Amino acid sequence: MKAVVCAEHGMADKLKLDVDWPEPEVGEHDILLEVKAAGLNFPDVLMIQGKYQAQPPLPFVPGGECAGIVKAVGEKVTRFKVGDKAIASTGVGAFSERIAANEYAAFPMPDALSFEQAAGVCITYFTSYHAFKQRANLQPGETVLVLGAAGGVGTTAIELAKLMGAKVVAAASTDEKLEICKQLGADEVINYTGIDLKARLKEVSGGKGFDVIYDPVGGDYAEPAIRNLAWNGRYLVIGFASGPIPSIPLNLALLKGASLVGVFWGRFVGEEPQANTKNVEELWELFNQGKLNPIVTDCYPIDQYEEAFNCMLERRARGKVIITT
């Protein structure tokens, strides 16, 4: 079968498309999924460079989430049958034509979504919902600043924060990206290219600061954002898409009575499985009610995998980057 293979660490040009990659073995608790679409996420970019906190041995097939059709089930599988549409959160292996996934790492696909939309649900929506619900305890009427707001997690953060009754200020690097943020319901937008971000954030917040800051970008944007936290504000550490991990003066947290809160959905699933299951049920209801509508504007066939990775690396993505098979 076809699969995108990482045989040596590096950038996307080091990857290869193998047309004879071994078929997956299906264990007794596994489903065999014929992959229709797979979501590309920042951890995939780190993983192929050997920079992620959990590194699979070489060679491996990257791709942590996908959507497709169940083609076979292990003898002890109870949650799926052949022909079902499913989403799987796999960690690796999704950039291939077929993948075996434990049935408990898979979810029935919401009827309202296409395969391309469903392929990008797990890491982005699950992360953002967990961030606002369990980590920030976001309340109606609070103000949320979303950095990197036009990316995969950023767009979901706008949607979910609005649904939870917050005012949302979206920040991104181009006016084109900010148009997407407006369509998703952002109340105000900021193009943070070439400006004094600290001053602009103070202006937009009326000097009051933001109750919650959702930051998947890190780097030079983190400190000016934290300096604009409100009293009792919560700064959500989502990731570091810009590259550098920022060093934060901790006196800022002291002066504002603020919290710097880590958000690691993968660990949350293992530590609090029942809470995660409840989150998924609530999200599925929102999808099927049409209250959430995943944005997919950057979609690439599997043989254009390098272009897909570069779209994310160069921060050109608007919504989710998807690889189709």
Image (cartoon, rainbow, N blue to C red):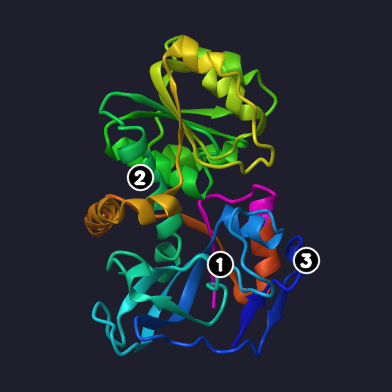
Q: Is residue 181 above or below residue 189?
A: below
Residue located beneath label 2 in the image = 130
Q: Residue at x 28, y 53 (%)?
A: 283
Q: Is residue 139 above or below residue 133?
A: above
Image quarter in which the C terminus is found: bottom right
N-terminal label among 3 and 1: 3
Going by the numbered disc 3, the residue's amino acid type is Asp
Q: Residue at x 64, y 62 (%)?
A: 308
**Picture disc at residue 63:** 1
Question: CA gap, disc 1 to disc 2?
Answer: 21 Å
Magenta stretch, residue numbers: 311-325
308 or 138, which is in the foreground? Answer: 138
Q: Residues within 10 Å of mark 1 (few under 14, many from 20)?
A: many
Asked whether the beta carbons under mark 1 and mark 2 sit within 8 Å of each other, the answer is: no
Q: Is residue 325 left or right of residue 193?
A: left
N-terminal label among 1 and 2: 1
Q: Is residue 39 above or below residue 260?
A: below
Image quarter in which the N terminus is found: bottom right
Q: Is residue 313 magenta?
A: yes
61 or 193, which is in the foreground? Answer: 61
195 or 228, which is in the foreground? Answer: 228
Q: Is residue 31 magenta?
A: no
**Helix, strand or loop status at disc 2:** helix
**Picture disc at residue 13:** 3
